[in-house]
Image (tube, helix red, strand yellow):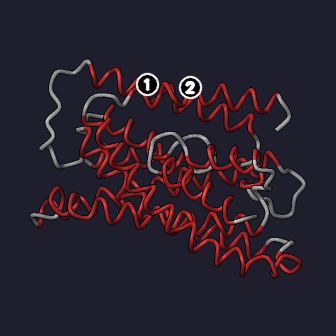
Amino acid sequence: MTILHVIILAIVQGLAELLPVSSSAHVIVAEKLMGMNPSAPEVTLLLVMLHTGTMFAVIVYFWSRWRDAFVQTATGLKSFIVGLILATVLTVVVGGVLIKIIEKVAFPHASHAWVEDLFGRLDLIAAALAAVGVLILYAGLRRKSVESDDPTSKEITPRQSLWIGAIQGLCLPFRGFSRSGATISTGMLTGVSKIRAEDFSFALAVIITPAAIGRELLRLVKTEHLNSSAGLLMPALDMGMVGAAFAFFAGLAALKWLSSWLENGRWYWFGVYCLVAALAVALLYHAGY
């Protein structure tokens, strides 16, 4: 793994993580095209660093929007916190159950299986990209046909929070099923304004990302390759710092793009892109990648 590989992955991660096109799908494809092993410990550590960079990009970009939208009043703050808690709890329940089921079904004889061992499967990624592409396309076209979308509508109801959390849970075990794409689309379909759906989706991201990072670090510690790969981890950590910086700035650029397209009625184009990407990934799978 060279510094050029790190910069390329950082830019791909930063752009795709914060656009509704699935960063994991794009990063895994990029790794395979560059001859890298997505499950190698040093690559796992690098991705942890890149996720950290994009998480800070989300905080910097949305901080003032969250303050203005949700925390101006005690009632608004309470509603925001309750919504985040409800959505996160349902995410953990739905995602946790799905992960356990998939690990038991896919690896019936393993003493301890990790769903992440399936993340390199391009056929599964293609199917997930196609599924989220349909969801984004439907939500975008349906909202485009609605004449009014009050951007000042701030309160997200418990019912809407639960729907968003449940769909976020579906995203956890499936690489390619974009978290931001699915949650924003679900918010739009349940009546949340586009801007508020975006704000709420990325607030959830700040909650769920540390947990995802922690799971990746736990898997890294428990991997049987850790001892033999320890010498590779410190250089990966150093390069990961560089990658985190690139991912941070790429993430800020992606968020500006996302907000512009969402607010100007171009959301459905991300769905079109996901469908095209699903076809491309399927072709790569059949080509032997």
Q: Amino acid at mark 1?
A: Leu
Q: Does dot 2 land on a helix, a strand or a loop?
A: helix
- Left or right, 265 with respect to 225, comes to left
Density class for disc 1 (Cα within 10 Å; few <14, some 14-19, many ≥20) is many
Q: Residue at x 75, y 44 (%)?
A: 33
Between residue 187 and residue 55, name the one nearer to us. 55
In which quadrant of the rendered view does residue 221 lie?
A: bottom right
Q: Residue at x 45, y 44 (%)?
A: 19
Residue furthest top as drawn: 145
Q: Amino acid at mark 2?
A: Leu
Numbered tag placed on residue 178 in the rendering? none
Q: How far across and how far down the image is residue 211, in percent?
A: 53, 67
Q: Is residue 20 above or below residue 112?
A: above
Q: Is residue 244 above or below residue 276?
A: below
Dividing the image into 4 quarters, which one contains the N terminus?
A: bottom right
Q: Does dot 1 land on a helix, a strand or a loop?
A: helix
Density class for disc 2 (Cα within 10 Å; few <14, some 14-19, many ≥20) is many
* Residue located beneath label 2 in the image: 275
Q: How far across and how far down the image is residue 242, in percent?
A: 57, 71
Q: Residue at x 57, y 66 (%)?
A: 243
Between residue 268 and residue 31, name the one nearer to us. 31
- Left or right, 134 with respect to 116, comes to left
* Residue located beneath label 1 in the image: 137
Dividing the image into 4 quarters, which one contains the C terminus?
A: top right
Q: Is residue 46 above or below residue 227?
A: above
C-beta proximity under 8 Å, tags 2 and 1: yes
